[in-house]
Amino acid sequence: MADPASSSAQPKGATGVLVLADGTAVWGNGFGAVGSAVGEVCFNTAMTGYQEVMTDPSYAAQIVTFTFPHIGNVGTNDEDFESAVEGAVGCIVREEVTPQSNFRSTTEFTDWLAAQGKIGLSGVDTRALTRRIRLSGAPNAVIAHAPDGKFDLHALMARAREWAGLEGMDLAQRVSREKSQDWVGGSWELGSGYGGADSSAKPHVVAIDYGSKDNIFRNLVKAGARVTVVPARTSLADIMAHEPDGVFLSNGPGDPAATGAYAVPVIKALLDADMPLFGICLGHQMLALATGAKTTKMHQGHRGANHPVKRLEDGVVEITSMNHGFAVDADTLPDSVEQTHVSLFDGSNCGIAVKGKQAFGVQYHPEASPGPQDSFYLFERFVGMLG
């Protein structure tokens, strides 16, 4: 284990640092919130959409390294939040944050990050950090910002070492909404913003919020559904009291096996009741757990845009956005479950369907913003099942 005080001497003027659990210190210029935060360091390959990434609850307890070097040019605004709850705790970028230059922008990224209580670190060799993650896996670390440049490196390293990490951690309860609500927002259009939801829509979807992105609910509305969102720990009886035509299982952070301790029995009961089900990301993983399959912690995870996924029924390749550090172990899928999609990067599972049931899930994000629209058909397929 390296001594953080000697592993990398603090450059003159450095106001930010990333201290890994092994003692490695990565220096840079701090921006955004002042202070420190602990999390798992990952990388995201998208060229834009940094506000959506930072407000995605699936990034809870994570520090995002953006591989695209220029971050900040589109600024931030009040419309591009994926959620009002916890997202990523910090971010790492190569260049100094670019000034905003977009007609929709209302706030500079640096100021927005500070207002959100999130820490940024610029001037880092993000290519080298990304290579390290790819070779050695996603490390636990503390990101810190001090305008006076004073840091207790040993204390930061100790905090990183003491943090338990994401494996075995249930974060869904932390980021889920506390009360049920009827979803009212529709899809976004240039010049008019978000439309409303049709309260008379016939198919009624109850969406279980394990840390969902709001754009998922908007896409369910766009596909023709009426949506009621319920908290992660909602009981089977309370779900059924809403008289759903189908149930949606959302994305979210943390270890699916840990969240599954309370969620999987509910999902199993819904399957037994022949309730139509659709899961995305964490919801997909817990649907698999409910059938008897297992999930595993990935070496580096998949996070970013332009991930190719092959649809096995016809060989079509969908270009997708992803954000997951756990995956369904395809070798553990029971005979009652069909693998429907695979990653063309590493062959990992990206979709399942339960035989004899109207229940399916995908690992990627068909609602992704930013991201291609190749996979919107999944929302239409699900809502079309509901009659």
Image (cartoon, helix red, strand yellow):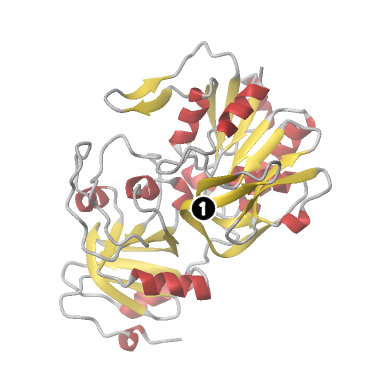
**Quarter of the rendering occupied by the C terminus:** top right
Q: Closest to the observer: 60 or 342?
A: 342
The local secondary structure at tag 1 comes to strand
* Number of marks in the rendered image: 1
| Residue 52 percent coordinates (x, y) | 37, 45
* Residue plotted at (60% across, 56% down): 344
* Residue plotted at (63% across, 56% down): 327
- Residue found at the very far right of the displayed protein: 335
Q: Is residue 140 left or right of residue 6?
A: right
* Residue plotted at (52% across, 71% down): 137
Badge 1 density bin: few <14, some 14–19, many ≥20, Cα 10 Å: some
* Residue that mark 1 sits on: 307
Residue 179 shows in this picture: no
Quick check: 189 above or below 75?
A: above
- Residue found at the very far top of the displayed protein: 200
Residue 29 shows in this picture: yes
Q: Closest to the observer: 180 or 62?
A: 62
| Residue 240 percent coordinates (x, y) | 67, 24
Q: Is residue 15 left or right of residue 349?
A: left
Quick check: 383 above or below 297?
A: above
| Residue 143 percent coordinates (x, y) | 34, 66
Q: Is residue 8 left or right of residue 135?
A: left
| Residue 100 percent coordinates (x, y) | 18, 48
Q: Closest to the observer: 256 or 224?
A: 224
Residue 166 placement: quadrant:
bottom right
Q: Is residue 332 left or right of residue 279?
A: right
Q: Amino acid at mark 1?
A: His
